[in-house]
């Protein structure tokens, strides 16, 4: 069953010179999750942040930290990201031949587990781990950089995953990341998503615009 829409600002688009202040500002503006994009320069063509940065950010905001690991191999760094304060850890189905084991490890740590799909990966790729996940993340751009345009073909994948999630009878977030704007958000929600990740669309106007930008995405 589709849940109410929640907004997860991606701090990849925040001002890195004052990340603590940025977190407090988006918290006050009404965000639901803090989305942390972790890139390794190997699985995706960019490098962002690691566990030490996450641990320093955690005290600045009580909202759940939604940590998206775009790294391979992922297993050697799981414990460090969990210890740093992740509330949700999402791994890519494409990053490891042992995603089922990785998700088990995340769940055994007592936090929520997510699985992500790149644009070319069909929804069916996660069918056999649906019993383990608390979140499914659809990448609606090619991961690695912010500010890209929404891939329209993602809508059918979102709808297919909505059906798969509902068939489980479990509460599983269906999250979409990439090209989420006030213009694309209504169609993404209509297709079945209930968590929207947005970087540029939230942070583009500075702290004075965060509340309005989050509200515009929520609809």
Image (spheres, helix red, strand yellow):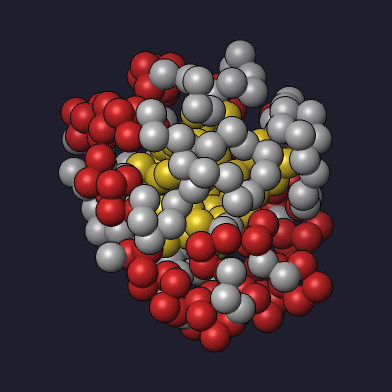
Residue sitting at 36 percent across and 50 percent down? 184
Above/below status of 57 relative to 179: below
Residue sitting at 61 percent across and 14 percent down? 97
Residue sitting at 77 percent across and 52 percent down? 49
Where, by quadrant of the figure, is residue 135 drawn?
A: top left
Above/below status of 154 relative to 171: above
Question: Which x, y percent locates residue 215?
Answer: 36, 72
The one nearer the camera, 127 or 189, is 189
Say whether residue 142 is left or right of residue 47. Answer: left
Where, by quadrant of the figure, is residue 154 drawn?
A: top left
Total marks drawn? 0
Question: Which x, y percent locates residue 196?
Answer: 41, 53
Question: Which x, y percent locates residue 68?
Answer: 59, 44
The one nearer the camera, 16 or 134, is 16
For the N terminus, the image quarter is: top left
Residue 18 visible in the displayed image:
yes
Say whether residue 129 is left or right of residue 147. Answer: left
Say whether residue 78 is left or right of residue 215. Answer: right
Residue that sits furthest to the bottom in the current view: 208
Residue 61 visible in the displayed image:
no
Question: Which x, y percent locates residue 207?
Answer: 58, 81
């Amino acid at each position: 069953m589709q849940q109410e829409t929640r907004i997860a600002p991606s701090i990849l688009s925040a001002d890195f010179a004052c990340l603590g202040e940025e977190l407090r500002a988006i918290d006050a503006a009404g965000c639901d999750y803090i989305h942390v994009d972790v890139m390794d320069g190997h699985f995706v063509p960019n490098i962002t942040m690691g566990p030490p940065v996450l641990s320093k950010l955690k005290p600045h905001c009580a909202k759940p930290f939604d940590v998206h690991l775009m790294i391979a191999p992922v297993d050697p760094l799981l414990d460090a990201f969990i210890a740093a304060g992740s509330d949700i850890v999402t791994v890519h189905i494409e990053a490891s031949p042992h995603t089922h084991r990785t998700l088990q490890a995340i769940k055994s740590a007592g936090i929520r587990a997510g699985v992500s799909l790149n644009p070319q990966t069909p929804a069916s790729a996660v069918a056999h781990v649906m019993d383990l996940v608390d979140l499914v993340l659809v990448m609606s751009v090619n991961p690695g950089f912010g500010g890209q345009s929404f891939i329209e073909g993602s809508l059918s994948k979102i709808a297919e995953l909505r059906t798969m999630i509902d068939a489980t009878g479990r509460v599983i977030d269906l999250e979409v990341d990439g090209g989420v704007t006030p213009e694309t958000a209504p169609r993404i929600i209509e297709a079945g998503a209930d968590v929207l990740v947005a970087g540029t669309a939230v942070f583009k106007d500075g702290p004075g615009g965060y509340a309005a930008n989050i509200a515009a995405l929520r609809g």
